[in-house]
Image (tube, rainbow, N blue to C red):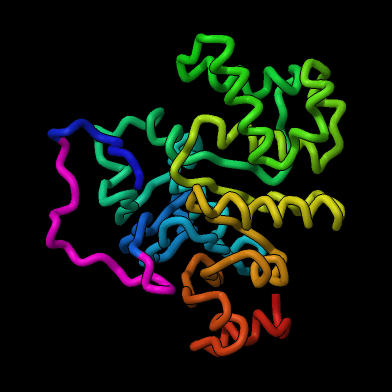
Amino acid sequence: MVAPLLSPLARVTPPDAASPATPHGHPPLIEVDRLSLYYGAARALHDISFAIPERLVTAFIGPSGCGKSTLLRCFNRMNDLIDNVRLEGSVRIGGEDIYARDIDVIELRKRVGMVFQRSNPFPKTIFDNIAYALRLQGFRRKSEIADIVEQSLHQAALWDEVKDRLHASALGLSGGQQQRLCIARAIAIKPDILLMDEPASALDPLATAKIEDLILDLKRQFTIVIVTHNMQQAARISDATAFFYLGELIEHDATGKIFTNPARKQTEDYVTGRFG
């Protein structure tokens, strides 16, 4: 379960508050309630409410510009870094409002890791890409850091490919390897949630398959939310799917139902390729 982000005295959601249902009946970890987001006067997200279950893969699908990545960045408050952004409604993780005034945003971002569309390794060695992130979190013992680096590379299915060149530059890795290194870096500090924004869109089919296999393996330990334009990818790797259009949540359900028996005609038209 997600660890508390606020102090023990901080106000959290009352225990008798109703939690929204999630696909497959799993308890919710992320709860979005009447969320709207504005860039200045432009409204990018419209009154979105739904819940994301724990330790499953949830895919966000929809055409470009529909708000998928904007919503994803709400979960670790990355939108705070953009000027003139205003948010209404709430996002709760583990029952706690992550936009409360006394939230520790640094602690939140430790708990909610992120992997971006394009791999962004540091211009350091493979080893130091992960060790640097650990040192920032206060790890000092060399043996402990080395153990976590190895464990993270194993979890990212990269260890066998790089174990003999850990002190070579990470920039010498292939694109797919660099993306798996970024995943290893993100999971090294043991987040509860892993956000992935189009993590395989810049990769070839073989590297994409490795990333997809990795996601299926990682969901045993992490709650994963992935933005993807690739509907076949969503169908292959996700347990639940949310379809967005023009900043609105059109439908959210188990992936099998979304792709075979959606409740909304707009969803059916999108997943069958009639528009997009």
Residue at x 64%, y 64% (from the top left corner): 237
Q: Quadrant of the C terminus?
A: bottom right
Q: Position of residue 206 (x, y in %)?
A: 86, 54
Magenta-drawn segment: 10-26
Q: Position of residue 194 (x, y in %)?
A: 53, 46
Q: Is residue 127 above or below residue 30?
A: above
Q: Position of residue 110 (x, y in %)?
A: 45, 32
Residue at x 62%, y 53% (from the top left corner): 217
44 magenta-colored: no
Front position in the image: 36 or 72: 72
User: Which SS type dominates the magenta stretch?
Assistant: loop
Q: Is residue 172 above or below residue 257?
A: above
Q: Is any part of residue 4 visible from this angle?
A: yes
25 magenta-colored: yes
Residue at x 54%, y 20% (from the top left corner): 134
Q: Position of residue 89 (x, y in %)?
A: 30, 56
Residue at x 35%, y 61% (from the top left corner): 28
Front position in the image: 118 or 126: 126
Instruction: Specify whether 244 is left or right of 154.
Output: left
Front position in the image: 248 or 178: 178
Q: Is residue 243 above or below residue 219?
A: below
Q: Is residue 263 above or below residue 147?
A: below
